[in-house]
Amino acid sequence: MQKKLGFGFMRLPLTDKQNQTSFDYDLLNKLVDVFIEKGFSYFDTALSYHKSKSEEAIRKSLVERYPRDAFQLATKLPPRVLHSEADCEKIFAQQLERCGVTYFDYYLVHNLGHTAYQQAQQYRVFEFVMRKKQAGAIGKVGFSFHDSPELLDEILTANPGLDFVQLQINYVDWESPAIQSRRCYEVARKHHMPVIVMEPCKGGNLAQLPDPAEKLMKAYNPNASIPSWAIRYAAGLDGVFMVLSGMAAMEHVMDNTSFMTNFETLNQAEHQVIGKVVDIINESVAVPCTMCRYCEDTCPKNIPIPDCFALYNGSRRATTDNNTSQLAYYLNLTATRGKACDCLGCKRCESVCPQHLVITKHLQEVSSLFDGKSLPATFKN
């Protein structure tokens, strides 16, 4: 029986955190090795991850080092990169070459929302992937989704031959009015559609919680890691057959595989703890960014938007001393990149944000906190 934990190639270990293509292959290879040694085999990448180099990374760290029947490989095609129906075939062939395979076990139409779905219809993407499935180049066809339950229902109704859907599900977004995880999940279940879960830890936000929330979890079970609560929450839902996790360190792989090897669903008391944790989190997180970096690739001013938000969130939670540290990181970060105040308000970033954040507004908040500030002399020394 296939285990429910998948290795996401969206946030890989890097030798230079400012260079999203500087993969630390020594570490990455070790992570892949341990993941497979522990009995797990599902790997997920996409055309756009790590500035379009993630597929190459998965070839080098996985495909070239293991027999093809030792793993299941998933990748994705974003409709927004298409300019014609012929592009589907061209890009698919390039993905096969970059990944070093002759077929994909799972293939997804990537990041569907209203605009992307219109593009998928315009260029007949679903018809294309179904032809590839019939030809044996794809095992199972699905799509990843970041929009309303109403649109999800429309897509699943119009495409009854699909095999699965990939949804953002975690305990913070379950009742979020922006993400609507619960309602999207319920639509998928109505269509009897198997579900893959992405962002169970919300881009790492549910791996490091505010102190009061972490204390609640540790009081109930001092031996359970904080991320384990989030991954078990998602994996325990009926119809979920895979939960993806980005694992950039050995402790991530060791921890995740430890509780997912013999997976147990959360009990009622654990769900009650999570309910209290959600209340605490909702009071403390200023910008619920998941660090997917889709926005960053569209910014004409090269603003490191996700990093700015991470520093802003850190400052909102931090003590006065730590606020100075956050400013130092911001000044270093923007020494060679755009500042928050450089935002043109073009909203290109907002058009691709899976979290539907009002990014331009949040950048103004970041700018108010950091721009024009300098470090105190005591910190410089």
Image (cartoon, rainbow, N blue to C red):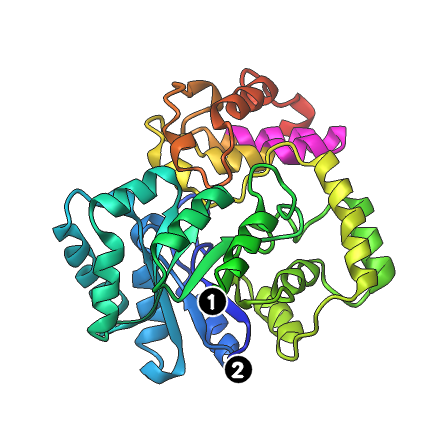
Which of the two discs, 1 and 2, labels the residue nearer the N terminus? 1
- Which disc, if any, is residue 296? none
Where residue 194 sits: x, y (%)?
49, 66
Crowding at dot 2, Cα within 10 Å, few <14 / some 14-19 / many 20+, comes out as some
Q: Look at discs 1 and 2 and give the one toward the viewer.
A: 2
Judge by depth and name the residue closer to the eye, 145 or 321: 145
Name the residue beneath numbered marker 2: 39
Is 85 magenta? The answer is: no
In the image, the segment drawn in magenta is 312-331
Judge by depth and name the residue closer to the eye, 147 or 104: 147
Picture quadrant of residue 165: bottom left
Magenta span: predominant SS is helix
Q: Quadrant of the C terminus?
A: top right
Judge by depth and name the residue closer to the eye, 242 or 154: 154
Q: Which amino acid type corresponds to the residue marked 1 in the rendered image?
A: Leu
Picture quadrant of residue 77: bottom left
Q: Is residue 301 above or below residue 162?
A: above
Name the residue beneath numbered marker 1: 27
Q: Is residue 21 visible?
A: no
Cα distance between the residues tagged 1 and 2: 19 Å
Q: Is residue 184 above or below residue 106?
A: above
> As drawn, is 8 to the left or to the right of 128?
right
List the single residue furthest toward the right.
219
Is 322 magenta? The answer is: yes
Residue drawn at x 67%, y 31% as measured from the top left: 315
> As drawn, is 172 to the left or to the right of 97?
right
Residue drawn at x 25%, y 64% as measured from the top left: 130
Please give the count of numbered marks on the rendered protein.
2
Q: Is residue 188 visible?
A: yes
